[in-house]
Amino acid sequence: MIHTAVKVIITSLLIVAISELSKRSSLIGALLASLPLISVLAMLWLYIETKDVTKVSDLATSVFWLVIPSLVFFISLPILLKKGLNFYLSMGLSMSATAVCYFLMIALLARYGIKL
């Protein structure tokens, strides 16, 4: 239970730090947010808990393939906001478009025999 609490605290602190730094500098915030910190932490926690490098490798491979459709979010959100759409509507549409792209990517990979 303490291990889980430590994981939550460290991960939460990173998100809060990125949010606070973004208020001062969008460049620094973007740099920290673009680093795969959450993925690295997830792989670290997974390895510490399982000592299974195959699971870590599988997670890293899955993250790689799913980063590609996640780019739709970062393309669509600023476009929608610049067009004057409401922030929450823009977020919802961008997340929905990303979810559709995740589904399409998973289906495409499965068609070519790549299982996530």
Image (cartoon, rainbow, N blue to C red):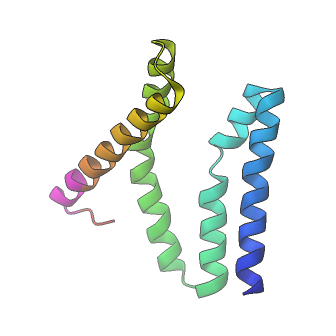
In this view of the protein, can residue 81 be seen by the observer? yes
Magenta-drawn stretch contains 111: yes
Up-down relation of residue 98 to residue 51 (above or below): above
For the N terminus, which image quadrant?
bottom right
Up-down relation of residue 7 to residue 31 (above or below): below
Give the quadrant of residue 22: top right
Up-down relation of residue 84 to residue 2 (above or below): above
- Residue depicted at x 65% and y 75%: 45
Name the residue nearer the viewer: 75 or 68: 75
Q: Which residues are magenta?
A: 107-113
Name the residue nearer the viewer: 111 or 24: 24
Name the residue nearer the viewer: 37 or 101: 101
> At which x and y percent is residue 34?
63, 41
> At which x and y percent is residue 49?
63, 85
For the C terminus, which image quadrant?
bottom left
Magenta-drawn stretch contains 38: no
